Image (spheres, rainbow, N blue to C red):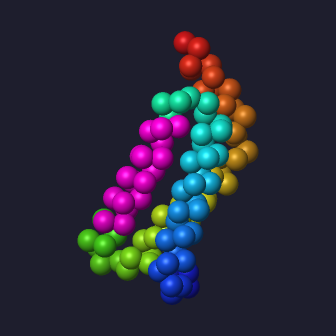
């Protein structure tokens, strides 16, 4: 159903999901290196997901919807443990 929406809206949804996820993770893990590397890794994984999906004959719209939905799901799923993630990141940074 979502894959039948115009591709421009799906790209916008994917961009918004990327920004929200990277902002949340950057806030929860207070490390400058992580804040620079994480968006690059997320976008790289998204490009890889789209490329592999296209090679398997899935539509571009379906792969963009998958990418955006997975980022939204990961952000929502990690939300309850954000304090533990921050605590662990600070503890690892001290060592």
In the image as oriented, which residue stretches furthest toward the left? 55
Say whether residue 44 is magenta. Answer: yes
Above-or-below relation of 66 to 91? below
Q: Position of residue 15 (x, y in %)?
A: 53, 63
Residue pictured at 70% horizontal, 47% vertical: 79
Above-or-below relation of 36 to 72? above
Above-or-below relation of 80 to 9? above
Say whether residue 15 is magenta. Answer: no
- Which range is magenta? 35-51
In the image as oriented, which residue stretches furthest toward the top? 95
Q: Is there any visible trace of residue 71 in the rendered image?
A: no
- Marks counted in the figure total 0
Quadrant placement of the C terminus: top right
Q: Quadrant of residue 19?
A: bottom right
Q: Position of residue 78 (x, y in %)?
A: 65, 46
Residue pictured at 56% horizontal, 65% vertical: 69
Secondary structure that dominates the magenta span:
helix
Q: Quadrant of residue 1?
A: bottom right
Residue pictured at 42% horizontal, 46% vertical: 40
From the viewer's perspective, tell me whether residue 56 is left or right of residue 44: left
From the viewer's perspective, tell me whether residue 17 is left or right of residue 54: right
Above-or-below relation of 42 to 8? above
Residue pictured at 45% horizontal, 76% vertical: 62
Q: Is there any visible trace of residue 59 in the rendered image?
A: yes
Q: Position of residue 25 (x, y in %)?
A: 60, 42
From the viewer's perspective, tell me whether residue 46 is left or right of residue 20: left
């Amino acid at each position: 159903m979502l894959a039948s929406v115009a591709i421009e809206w799906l790209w916008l949804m994917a961009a918004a999901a990327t920004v929200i996820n990277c902002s949340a993770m950057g806030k929860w893990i207070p490390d400058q290196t992580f804040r620079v590397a994480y968006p690059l890794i997320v976008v790289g994984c998204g490009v890889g997901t789209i490329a592999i999906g296209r090679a398997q004959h899935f539509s571009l719209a379906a792969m963009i919807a998958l990418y955006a939905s997975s980022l939204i799901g990961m952000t929502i799923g990690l939300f309850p443990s954000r304090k533990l993630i921050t605590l662990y990141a600070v503890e690892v940074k001290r060592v």
